[in-house]
Structure formats: C-alpha cells, structure tokens
C-alpha cells in the first residue's frame, strides 16, 4: 500500500471522488472521458504532493508551475490543454458545491493548438476497406456490418459499441445512437448498411453466440459480439478496425474516427446543409461541424456559382 504521505490531502481525494461520480452519473460522460479526467486530475494531485501545494487551494502561480512542468516533460499542447480543461471542470464543480473557489483555474489560458484538418478515407480506399472482411467467417460478417454502420452513421466508436439489436429500426431505416452526455439522435442509413446488418443478424451473430458457449445474460441484446459471445467494447472494435485497415492497405494514421470525418465530408460534398450534418453527427455546436467545410472548397465554390446572383459572372 502506498505511503499516505505520498498521496494528496484527504479533502482533495474526497472532492475528486465526488467530481468523478458527478460527471459519470449526472452528466453522463462516456467511460473513456471519465477515465481521461480522472487520470489528468490524479496527475495533478501527485504533482501537488511533490511541489508541497494545497491541491484544493492552488494559486495562479502554482497552476502555472504545474503547466510548465507538463511542457518541460514534452507533453503536446493538446495534452496540456486537456489537463487544464480537467482542472477547470473540477474546480467549477468544487465552486458549485461550495468547497473552494475556481478563480485560479479559470484565470489561466489554454495553450494555442495548431488547427489540423481531420483525416478522411478516399473513395477507392473506402472501397478497399469495406471489402476487407472475410465474409465466409462469422467474424468477417460482423466486421462488414461494423464498417458499413461506421460509414453510414458517422458514429463514434463508443456509440457503435453501445448499439443493441433494438437500436436498428429496419422499418424506418434508422439507427438510434447515444452520444456524449447520453444525448440521443436518430440517423437514417442507406440500404447497403441495413443489408449488412441483416446478414450479420441472420448468419454472423448466431454463430458467434453459439461459439461462445455461454448464455446471453445481457437483456439488452448487444449488437456486436466477440468470439466468446460477449459485447465488444470500444477497444475491441478499434482493434478489429485496425486489422481491417491494415488488410486494406490504409495508412496507420487512419483511425475509426476517420470514418466519422469521411461521413461528414462526403455528406457536405454531396450537397447536405451544415445544420443537417451537425444533427447527424450529434455536435452540440455548429462551430465544430464547420471544420469540415475546409475539406470541401469545391462544393462551396459550386454553391456560390449556383446560388449567388452574380455567381456566373
């Protein structure tokens, strides 16, 4: 067991436990986000012990020293910004709970992060990826369903992992997704994706369930099953995606999130309006969706030419 003197003060640990419970149960943040916040705040707590700083009552100077240490450790600006964001959220919650003020944390500015355009999958590469699964195997039928739903819905990988059979409505040709903060959205999908789901439900999933040799204990009937018949979490789906991307010859920087970026970019290139894409992606702010307009300059130029009174001049 760790020496108590190496741990942050008890009042900080109690506040941290309360904050983690709040963002998990009340705000409904994803398990991945909760773990990230907890990790960032644990790192801060450990630093306060080394630096002899009161973890609940840091000064602006103290927090600047902490961020400077992260920079000195060669953390990327985006990572430093994530640590600061976690501290701000934690101290805001502490202020609302009447524990301490959040003034010091809110004073600091986040480091400037260079904007980079999201990675997307080109048309020919997408065809190679969608053709990568071995449809003679139950796992391949499942993987084909996964890829088609990725491309058809623009879902985050965590959203895809939470899908149940009941999430698919064949009558209305829609999929029900639960995003950040448990926000629900309904996304219409194309016929090819539904055909992939139907084949998986008829051929792949029963075989995986039988091979697992275990009772289906989850009453919610998870859509994606592992070879043992259990629900596949985001990490398992990410692993399968990477295997398929390698088979298709895609570069290593193409991640599952690239499917979401490609979904948005292709919709805009096809003429969809920004507000519709925002709703389909589940973005809380339109400014987040606007990033994709940088990837479709030809479409925007075409819109000006077609719609502006002097567009063809």
Image (cartoon, grey):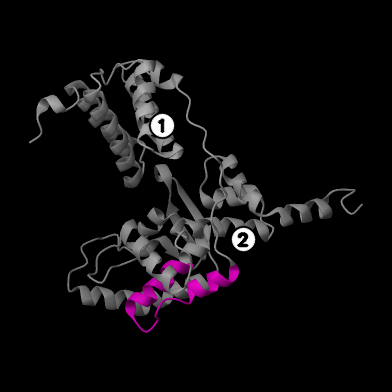
Q: Nearer the viewer, residue 59 or 219?
A: 59
Residue contact between numbered discs 1 and 2, judged by CB atoms under 8 Å? no
Residue 308 lies, in percent from the top left, at 84, 48
Residue numbers of the magenta segment: 123-148
On the image, numbered disc 1 is attached to which residue? 85
On the image, numbered disc 2 is attached to which residue? 266
Residue 39 lies, in percent from the top left, at 29, 38
Name the main secondary structure of what is drawn in magenta: helix
Q: How far apart in space, not on screen, are marks 1 and 2 (Cα)?
A: 32 Å
Quadrant occupied by the N terminus: top left
Chain-order first, disc 1 or disc 2: 1
Q: Is residue 116 above or below residue 68?
A: below
Q: Residue furthest bottom?
A: 136
Q: SS class of the residue under badge 1?
A: helix
Q: SS class of the residue under badge 2?
A: helix
Q: Is residue 138 magenta?
A: yes
Q: Quadrant of residue 96?
A: top left
């Amino acid at each position: 067991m760790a020496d108590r003197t190496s741990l942050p003060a008890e009042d900080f640990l109690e506040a941290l436990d309360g904050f983690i419970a709040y963002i998990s149960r009340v705000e409904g943040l994803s398990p991945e986000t909760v773990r990230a916040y907890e990790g960032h705040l644990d790192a801060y707590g450990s630093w306060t012990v080394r630096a002899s700083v009161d973890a609940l009552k840091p000064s602006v100077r103290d927090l600047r020293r902490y961020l400077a240490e992260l920079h000195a450790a060669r953390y990327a600006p985006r990572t430093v910004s994530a640590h600061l964001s976690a501290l701000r959220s934690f101290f805001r919650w502490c202020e609302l709970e009447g524990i301490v003020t959040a003034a010091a944390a809110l004073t600091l500015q986040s480091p400037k992060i260079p904007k980079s355009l999201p990675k997307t999958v080109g048309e020919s590469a997408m065809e190679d990826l969608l053709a990568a699964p071995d449809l003679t195997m139950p796992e391949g039928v499942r993987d084909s369903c996964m890829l088609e739903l990725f491309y058809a819905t623009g879902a985050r990988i965590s959203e895809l992992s939470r899908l149940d059979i009941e999430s698919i409505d064949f009558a209305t040709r829609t999929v029900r997704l639960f995003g950040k903060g448990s926000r629900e959205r309904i996304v219409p999908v194309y016929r090819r994706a539904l055909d992939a789901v139907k084949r998986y439900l008829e051929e792949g999933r029963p075989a995986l369930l039988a091979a697992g040799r275990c009772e289906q204990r989850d009453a919610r009937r998870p859509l994606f099953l592992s070879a043992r018949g259990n629900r596949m979490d985001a990490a398992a789906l990410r692993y399968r995606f990477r295997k398929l991307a390698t088979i298709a010859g895609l570069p290593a920087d193409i991640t599952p999130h690239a499917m979401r970026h490609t979904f948005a970019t292709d919709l805009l290139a096809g003429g969809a309006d920004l507000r519709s894409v925002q709703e389909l992606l589940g973005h809380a702010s339109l400014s987040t969706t606007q990033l994709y307009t940088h990837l479709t300059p030809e479409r925007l130029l075409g819109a000006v030419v077609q719609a502006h009174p002097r567009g063809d001049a």
